[in-house]
Image (cartoon, grey):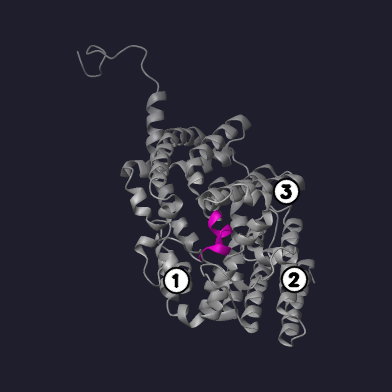
Amino acid sequence: MPTAAIEALLLFAAVITAALLFVAHWITPNQAVVLTTLLLLLLLGLSWRNFNQGRHPCFFFMGMLLLLQGGRLLTYCLGSEPDPLRVRVQTGLPFDLSRHDQGTALLCVALSGLCIYAICRLNYRPIAVLNTTSAMQYLPYLYLLFYMSVPVQIFKNYSYYQFAQGHGGYMYFWVSHGEFAATVPLWVRLISLITLPSFVGIFILETRRRYLYLATTCYFVSSLLILLMGSRIGTLALIVALWYAAGIKSGKKTRTLAVVVLACVLFAIAGLFQALREDSDVTAYAVDPLKFVTLSGNSLDVTLVVIKYKEIFSAYAGSYMWNELTAGFSPHDLEHYFRGRELGHDVSVLLNPGAFEQGVGTAGSYIAEAYMIGGVAGVVVISFLIGLALHLLYRFSRTPLSLFMVLMVLPEFINMPRGDLLDWLSVLARTLLLLTVLTLGWKVYSVLLWLQQAPRPSQPWTAERLPGTR
C-alpha cells in the first residue's frame, strides 16, 4: 500500500479513536482542544514536508485553518486563553455551549482539515518548473496597462481614504460600500480593476528582478491607503499567493527561515492594521502576538453558533449560496443587509443586533456553512471537494495562463476558514470577464504595434507611380 494511503488511514484512525473516547467521556473538551490543535499543527507540518516545502495551495490553507479556526485552540495550549470554546464575539455576555456541541465543533474542524489534506496528499504529483517563454510577448502590453492604471488606483484609494477619515474609518466602509464607490467616477473604478490582473501577469512572466521588484513596490504602495483604512485580509492573502507563485516559478528549495520571517512580517502587518482599524494601541498586537492569534481565531465562534442553532440558519442555505455568487461584483455591505444574504451577518444579528446596526459584525466560516448544509457528513463531503479543488489549483499551475487564473482565485480559498464556500466562483467569473477585456485590448495593441512596425515605401507614392495611372 502506498505511503500516502497508509498516512491518511492512520490519521483518520486517530481522529475516529479520539472522537470515540470523547463520546465515552474519557476525554474532556479541553483535552479535545489540545488534540485538535496537535492535529492541525501536524497537518501543517506534513503539508510542508510532503508538498515540496509548502509549494501547494493545501499548505497555505492548512496555515489559515490553524490561525482562523484554531487560533484560540493554539493559544489555549500556550496558556494564554482560558476558555477557547466560549462564544464571545458580538456578545456582551459570553456563553458556553453543551459538551456535545463543543465536541461536534472540534470534530468538524479536525475532519475538515484531514479530509482536505488527504485528497491533496493522495493525488500529489510534483509539477515541472514554470516555463514562461511562450507568453513573454504579452509582457510589454501588461506593463503598459499596469503603469497606466496605477495612478488611477492611487487616486481612487486616496479618495476612499479621505472619505473614510471623515466618516468613521473602516467601519463606515464596511457599512456602506456604495457611498465610498460614489466618491469617485465610474471610469476611475473601471480602470482600477485592471491594476491587479496586469500586476499578477507581470509577476508571473517577469524574470528580471529589478523590474519585478519595481512593479511589486508600485502595486503595494498604491494599496497602502486601503491598508491604512484597516482592510487588510485581501492584501495579505495576495502576498501569500504571490509567494506560492514565486516558488512555482523558481523551483528552488525554500529556506525555512524565510518562511518564518514572512510569517512574522505578515503577523506584524496584520496586527498593526487591526490596531489602526479598531483605534486601539498600535503596539498591543506587536507586544502580545498571542492576543492577535486569539482574536484571529474568533471565526471559531461562527462555527460554534451555527452548530448550536443549525435549524435557524439551514432554512436560508440556498439563499446564502446564491448571494455568494454575486460577492465578486457587489460587496455585501451592511447597508443592504437582509436575512439570508450572508451567514456571517445573520450570526452577528442573532448574537447582537444592536452592535450590528452600528457596523460591528463578524466574518463567515466554510465549516459552519458546510455543517448547516449537511451536518458532520456535509463537512466531510464538502471538505473532500475543497481538497479536490486545491489539488486542481496545483495542477493548473503548470502554464502561465492557468497560473494566472490560480493566483486570482487562490486568495479566496486561503480566506475560506473565515469566508464563504462559493466566493471563489464569483471571483472566477469576474476574472474571466476581465481576461476577456484584456484579450480584446491585446488584439487592439497588436494591431497598433503591427502598424507601427509595418514596412513603409522608401519613396512616397505619387500620381505618376500609382499602378494604372499615366
Kind of residue at badge 3:
Val
Q: Residues within 10 Å of mark 3 (few under 14, many from 20)?
A: few
What secondary structure is marked by label 2?
Answer: helix
Asked if marks 2 and 1 touch (Cβ < 8 Å), the reply is: no
Residue 415 part of the magenta segment: yes
- Front tag of 3 and 2: 2
The residue labelled by disc 2 is: 34
Residue 305: percent from left, percent from top: 54, 75
* Image position of 248 with respect to 302: above or below: above
- Front tag of 1 and 3: 1
Q: CA distance from mark 3 to mark 2?
A: 23 Å
The residue labelled by disc 1 is: 346
Residue 120 part of the magenta segment: no
Marks 1 and 3, the one that precedes in the sequence: 3
* Image position of 184 with respect to 100: above or below: above
Q: CA distance from mark 2 to mark 1?
A: 30 Å
* Image position of 282 with respect to 326: above or below: above
Residue extent of the magenta highlight: 411-420
* Image position of 38 with respect to 456: above or below: below
What secondary structure is marked by label 1?
Answer: helix
